[in-house]
């Protein structure tokens, strides 16, 4: 990790000029990310948007997906999470194979191409009830059950699974790679401080930054197109936010596998421990997105439109080039009170900002035709769903 020195001060104009020329140091990014409403902020956003236009053109992508919350039991207790449940708690559920296939089939009928598996992290590690449930399902681990369901969804419905199950070891990644053209794990933050008592990750052993970086690195070694990202506004400092973006860039520089970086904003919900915690403003989100674009260069930068309410099109001015997975069928189980915009409306509002909305697969176009990045058994199926440019 970089250690940012608070004593280093670079004039904003100098930091921005260097960024426009393609050079962003952690110190300069620390200056840029502090821009707020006004001329500095406008010039930062304009520089990021210009960079996006140069590198990505006028196309903004999304993936048509169904969300499959395989289990909402989780051994972690993140302070901002409304998804997780304990066994016996109202709403606690582990999906049966029939339920999984039914959701995937319904999605396939609506033209979805992606089955996003999101689930709690290793619930069997602390809940005997989950160990028993897995035994009934013929598995010892949640990741084993996940692999079986990814295989079945792929083979029985044709949807491409994209697994997002928390920390994974090399063997888990190898097994899942057979059925997943892409996978994901949010880095969220590189700040160890957030794991201290009273902080959002103090009861979340799977949120230790070093462990998350290890999983992302292992995915790089295995050449798995990988989605990651940061969660902003959970108590990290602005310099820590910059540090996390540089950590992602370094991994991508080494392995070339980070297909997408999400800049997700914390939203307060009435039923979470952090319900009174301040949410980042749209301006703050936009500034962070702009700095992410400048640090991450030609990598794909995403923000979920449903977490910015009606103001989401303004984020296009900060340099993102993807809206993430949009479901015509299932709600966002992680943020159930925030409905996704209808795809037609998303296309219209994207066009109103001067951009064209295009559907991609769960795996980004850059990776679709690269043999080293997709399992040989999976590649023909992925390519049959893609056009010449690798889009859906
Ligand atoms: S955010 Fe993920 S790891 Fe944290 S409690 Fe929720 S489901 Fe578990």
Image (cartoon, rainbow, N blue to C red):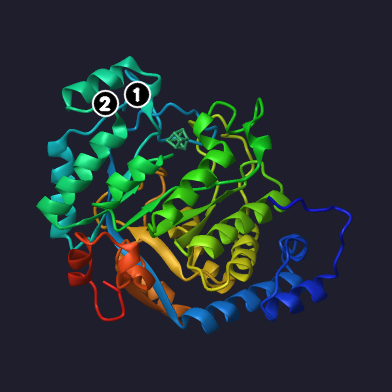
Q: In the rendered view, would you say 229 is above or below 389?
A: above
The nearer-to-camera label among 1 and 2 is: 2
Q: Is mark 1 within 8 Å of ligand 1?
A: no
Secondary structure under the numbered disc 2 in the rendered image:
loop
| Residue 33 x %, y % | 71, 61
Taking the spot 33% from the left edge, 59% from the top edge, the residue there is 326
| Residue 367 x %, y % | 36, 69
Q: Which mark is residue 181?
A: none
Taking the spot 74% from the left edge, 64% from the top edge, the residue there is 35
| Residue 333 appears anywhere in the view | no
User: Is disc 2 surrounded by few (<14), some (14 to 19) or many (20+) residues within 10 Å?
Assistant: some
Taking the spot 32% from the left edge, 18% from the top edge, the residue there is 88
| Residues at circles 1 and 2 in contact by the CB criterion of under 8 Å | yes
Taking the spot 58% from the left edge, 41% from the top edge, the residue there is 209
Secondary structure under the numbered disc 1 in the rendered image:
helix
**Residue under numbered circle 1:** 124
Q: Which mark is residue 140?
A: 2
| Residue 26 x %, y % | 73, 61
Nearest to the observer: residue 243 or residue 174: 174
Marks 1 and 2, Cα distance to the nearest angstrom? Answer: 8 Å
Splitting the image into 4 quarters, where does residue 319 fall?
bottom right
| Residue 120 x %, y % | 38, 34
**In the displayed structure, does residue 283 sit left or right of residue 357?**
right
Nearest to the observer: residue 153 or residue 106: 153
**In the displayed structure, does residue 209 sit left or right of residue 384?**
right
């Amino acid at each position: 990790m970089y250690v940012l020195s608070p004593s280093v001060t670079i004039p904003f104009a100098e930091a921005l000029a260097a960024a426009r020329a393609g050079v962003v140091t952690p110190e300069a990014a620390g200056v840029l990310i502090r821009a707020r409403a006004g001329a500095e902020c406008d010039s930062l956003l304009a520089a990021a948007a210009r960079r996006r236009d140069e590198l990505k053109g006028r196309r903004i992508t999304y993936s048509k997906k169904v969300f499959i919350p395989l289990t909402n039991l989780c051994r972690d207790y993140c302070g901002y999470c409304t998804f997780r449940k304990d066994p016996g708690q109202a709403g606690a559920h582990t999906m049966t194979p029939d339920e999984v296939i039914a959701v995937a089939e319904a999605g396939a009928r609506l033209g979805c191409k992606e089955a996003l598996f999101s689930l709690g992290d290793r619930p069997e590690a602390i809940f005997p009830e989950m160990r028993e449930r897995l035994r009934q399902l013929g598995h010892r681990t949640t990741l084993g059950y996940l692999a079986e369901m990814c295989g079945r969804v792929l083979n029985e419905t044709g949807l491409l699974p994209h697994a997002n199950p928390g920390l994974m070891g090399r063997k888990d990644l190898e097994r899942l790679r057979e059925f997943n053209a892409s996978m994901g794990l949010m880095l969220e933050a590189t700040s160890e401080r957030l794991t201290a008592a009273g902080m959002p990750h103090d009861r979340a052993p799977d949120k230790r930054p070093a462990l998350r970086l290890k999983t992302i690195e292992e995915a790089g070694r295995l050449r798995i197109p990988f989605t990651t990202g940061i969660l902003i506004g959970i108590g990290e400092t602005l310099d820590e936010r910059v540090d996390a973006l540089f950590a992602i860039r370094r991994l991508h520089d080494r392995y070339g596998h980070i297909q997408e970086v999400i800049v997700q904003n914390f939203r307060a919900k009435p039923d979470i421990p952090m319900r009174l915690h301040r949410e980042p403003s749209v301006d703050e989100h936009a500034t962070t997105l702009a700095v992410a674009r400048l640090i991450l260069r030609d990598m794909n930068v995403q923000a979920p439109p449903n977490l910015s309410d009606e103001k989401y099109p303004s984020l296009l001015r900060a340099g993102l080039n993807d809206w993430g997975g949009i479901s015509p069928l299932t709600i966002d189980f992680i943020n159930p009170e925030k409905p996704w915009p209808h795809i037609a409306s998303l296309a219209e509002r994207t066009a109103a900002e001067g951009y064209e909305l295009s559907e991609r697969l769960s795996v980004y176009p850059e990776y679709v035709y690269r043999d080293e990045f997709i399992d040989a058994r999976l590649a023909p199926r992925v390519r049959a769903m893609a056009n010449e440019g690798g889009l859906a």
